[in-house]
Amino acid sequence: MQKAIIWPPYLLPILSRKTRGRPLVYLDSAATTQKPYEVISAVSDFYAEHNANTRRGIHELSEEATELYEKTRDIVKNFLRAKHREEIIFTSGTTEGLNLLAFGLAGELGRGDEILLTEAEHHSNIVPWQIVAKERHLKIKFAPVKADGRLDLNAYKKLLNRRTKIVSITHASNVTGAITPLDKLVPAAHKIGALIIVDAAQSVAHLPLNVQKLDCDFLVFSGHKLYGPTGVGVLYGKKRLLEKLTPRRYGGQMIEQVKKNKTTLAELPARLEGGTMPIAEIVGLGEAINFLRNFGWQKIKTHDQGLCEYGLKRLSTIPDLRLLGPTDFKNRLPIFSFTISGIPAHDLATLLDEAGIAVRAGHHCAEVLHTALHVLVSARASCALYTSRADIDALIERLLEIKAIFHG
């Protein structure tokens, strides 16, 4: 069995604190990851030493801020294996990226065109498309999931047709941890001429992404899911497609020239980055990616699969517990959503919190998926690089105590 990664407290300062008077066991990383010292330091250092707006000044501070900002774009480009640095657009997160795509691509869609989603999607990959569909008289279809939360590939392929213009799909579920086989989905979408968008919010910290190899048309993720700051994210798109995308924010350096009767927009990437961007957070994102890459993907894979195998084994020992998601530890992320018969999910989360264990309860912004799995809400324990088997043991021990409280 692979040894757990040991974290000195100074690397992730928050893990040394106590909550409810107990040592913190943080199992809510699918909602947001904790931040290593390097990221915290990078954000603090920017404000202390380099704070200025980008592109808008010829003074030294502005030049330094611009250099750090654009350096991060290169870091992201290399991280995603993109072809051009202009294909990297900074956003506030996955939600903004998906909204930018939904409303930015709307002008290319007409009455009767179809958008294909799946039942596993996060609300941010459903609601914008619903709004666009209503405005432009489009049709949304949902590829179903199987009983274990995995996508039904045969059903997905049958739903593709000449009216399908956009496929927008999660790379990994934030509820079941199920990994979507993009190598099968992307070619099928392109075969019928559809654009394909990948929501990599959950997968970005766990799986290596090569957008050229995937051949996806667009991909989005949030910085705070991969040990970076909140309020920053990335939209990747093929350059020829981004050049046709209608911006959603106007003003600032996304404009080249303004006349009383006409405005000319700047070239990529500036044209899609209107207004003052979250510069310090973007710098922090670069440090988070460097932090992640320093581990190496093989070490991350070994760690994640070890947690998956151990977590699935320990959870299976709890009577009346239903796990949502695949039971094969090799085809999922270490995200464990579950219910326990007779105990409301929010009560589980509250009683876990009393023991210093942080989990999430609810439908996790994936109500459609919960409905498909015939469950209203669930409790979710989600792991990251700093999660240990001792954390999972603490979860199991407390769950057994909670069962005793409810069932005697």
Image (cartoon, rainbow, N blue to C red):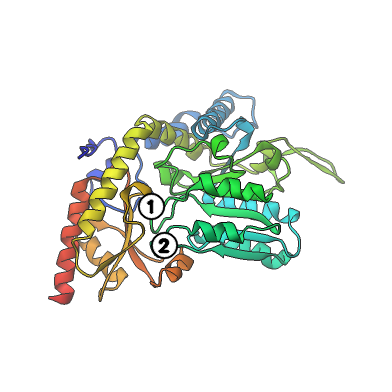
Q: Secondary structure at mark 2?
A: loop
Residue 312: image location, x then y, percent: 26, 55
Residue 128: image location, x then y, percent: 61, 60
Classify residue 52 as left or right of residue 56: left
Mark closest to the chain's N terminus, 2 or 1:
1
Classify residue 141 as left or right of residue 75: right
Quadrant of the rendered image containing residue 28: bottom left
Q: Residue at x 23, y 70 (%)?
A: 320
Q: CA distance from mark 2 to mark 1?
A: 10 Å
Q: Residue at x 18, y 48 (%)?
A: 390
Q: Quadrant of the C terminus?
A: bottom left
Q: Amino acid at mark 1?
A: Ala
Classify residue 288 as left or right of residue 156: left
Classify residue 159 as left or right of residue 19: right
In the image, residue 228 sits, relative to residue 46, either above or below, namely below
Q: Residue at x 14, y 71 (%)?
A: 404
Q: Is residue 180 visible?
A: yes
Q: Is residue 385 visible?
A: no
Report the front residue among 51 and 72: 72
Residue 300: image location, x then y, percent: 34, 37
Q: Which mark is residue 364?
A: 2
Q: Residue at x 31, y 49 (%)?
A: 329
Instruction: Find out whether the residues at labels 2 and 1 contact each other: C-beta distance under 8 Å.
Output: yes
Quadrant of the rendered image containing residue 394: bottom left
Quadrant of the rendered image containing residue 273: top right
Q: Amino acid at mark 2?
A: His
Q: Which mark is residue 30?
A: 1
